[in-house]
Amino acid sequence: MKFTIKISLCLLIMLSIACDSDLLKSSYKELGTFDTKLEAQNKAITHILSQYGSLPQNEYYKVIYSFRDADPGDFSRNSMWYHKASNELAIEVDIHSGMACQWKQVSKTVLQQAAMSKKSLNKVDSLSRPNQELGRCL
């Protein structure tokens, strides 16, 4: 009886540790659903800027958002990544597939100017160094 209780207790502890693991938590901050991709990207830039002081230094901060496609019943999900230490901004068009578009030299000042613009990623693109063709991201 004591042996069964000890095994059950060990399994319970292991399960609770595993459930609290970062591997099981989403590494993305959910921003919600927007009417357009432009609106979603503007919100993502604004959110990243609002969190700037508490962003991690050595890893990407990721926000995920949905927006309506041309067909009103369809939605797309993209994410925006920002790396504070290296001043890099990226877009992921297929969640968990990695960066599709990336910009370097995206400082806090660039983010601030982008947040004031109605087309935030176009502003980022004009003030930083793009690293790809932009068709899928802008």
Image (cartoon, helix red, strand yellow):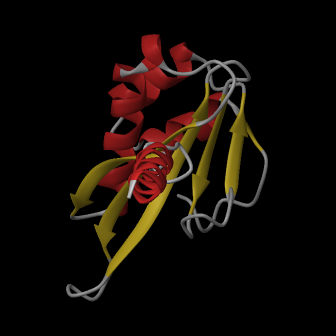
Position of residue 4 measured from the top left corner of the image (x, y, whole percent): 43, 60
Hey, which residue is sitting farthest front in the picture? 1
| Residue under the image location 31 percent in, 41 percent down | 43
Left or right: 23, with 86 as reference point: left
Q: Relative to 55, say whether 22 is above or below.
A: below
Toward which corner of the image does residue 115 lie, by quadrant?
A: top left
Which residue is rendered at x = 68% and y = 56% of the image? 99
Taking the view exactly as shown, the residue that stands out farthest to the top is 53
Q: 63 or 122, which is in the foreground?
A: 63
Closer-to-camera residue (38/89): 89
Relative to 25, residue 4 above or below: below
Please identify the quadrant where the N terminus is shown. bottom left
Above or below — where is 75 with respect to 50? below
Q: Nearer the viewer, residue 97 or 103?
A: 97
Residue 129: x percent and y percent? Answer: 75, 35
Residue 26 percent across, percent down from the top left: 45, 51
Look at the picture and state if 50 lies above or below 89.
above
